[in-house]
Image (tube, rainbow, N blue to C red):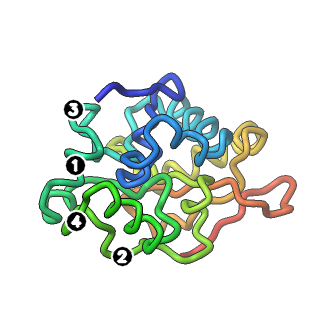
């Protein structure tokens, strides 16, 4: 698979679920808010460690089609919904079936609530091995103003996301502080 860079450290497939990537390829970029890429990239630069969002493509070694044709138990070993998430299961499955997909390639369930910022392309969940989620929250707070200028508005509370950090750019009308939410 040819990977499409969207920033210095991230590729499009890292922000997109495999179903959307299979259906739309490079056009999937239109479903990710530019500020999501911007603040995610800046957090990665601040942390100075590799960060993972989605890894279903195995660093470009696997196409979305190849991934979706695997048994579900193999699919479940990968991060696939830490960026954009499917909004409408029925619509997507209809489109997937029209392309000959069936069985484990279809969407079994939609992850997250109906207003999840992931479904609007405004969120990313990053995983890394150097810091605790509390440490990352503290570091983000140190860079809060800069990150808010890039569009970051919200974090999930670190106690609810111990192995990742959820960041999003929803409208909050909080001018000078980040909204901390609990899922």
**Which comes before the other along the chain, label 2 or label 3?**
3
Figure check: 116 above or below 40: below
Q: Which residue is mark 2?
A: 109
Q: Which residue is mark 4?
A: 102
10 left or right of 43? left
* Front in this rendered view, residue 57 or 95: 95
Q: CA distance from mark 4 to mark 2?
A: 14 Å
**Which comes before the other along the chain, label 4 or label 2?**
4
Asked which secondary structure carries label 1, the reply is helix
Residue at position x 73%, y 45% in the image: 151
Q: CA distance from mark 2 to mark 3?
A: 26 Å
Q: Categorize mark 2 by other alpha carbons within 10 Å: few (<14), some (14-19), many (20+).
A: few
Mark 3 and 1 residues: CB-CB less than 8 Å, in contact?
A: no
Q: Which residue is mark 3?
A: 61
Q: Position of residue 52 (x, y in %)?
A: 37, 42
Image label count: 4
Q: Position of residue 106 (x, y in %)?
A: 29, 66
Asked which secondary structure carries label 3, the reply is loop
89 left or right of 29? left
Q: Which residue is mark 1?
A: 67
Q: CA distance from mark 4 to mark 1?
A: 13 Å
Q: CA distance from mark 3 to mark 1?
A: 10 Å
Residue at position x 84%, y 53% in the image: 176
């Amino acid at each position: 698979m040819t990977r499409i860079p969207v920033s210095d450290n991230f590729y499009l497939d890292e922000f997109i679920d495999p179903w959307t990537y299979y259906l739309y390829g490079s056009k999937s970029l239109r479903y990710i808010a530019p500020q999501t890429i911007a603040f995610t990239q800046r957090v990665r630069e601040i942390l100075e460690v590799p960060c993972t969002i989605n890894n279903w493509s195995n660093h470009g070694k696997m196409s979305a089609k190849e991934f979706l044709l695997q048994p579900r138990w193999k699919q479940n070993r990968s991060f696939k919904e830490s960026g954009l998430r499917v909004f409408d299961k029925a619509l997507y499955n209809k489109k997937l079936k029209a392309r000959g997909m069936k069985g484990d390639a279809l969407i079994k369930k939609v992850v997250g609530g109906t207003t999840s910022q992931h479904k609007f392309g405004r969120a990313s969940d990053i995983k890394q091995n150097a810091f605790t989620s509390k440490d990352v929250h503290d570091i983000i707070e140190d860079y809060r103003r800069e990150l808010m200028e890039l569009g970051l508005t919200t974090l999930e509370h670190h106690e609810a996301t111990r192995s990742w950090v959820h960041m999003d750019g929803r409208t909050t009308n909080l001018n000078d502080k980040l909204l901390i939410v609990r899922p």
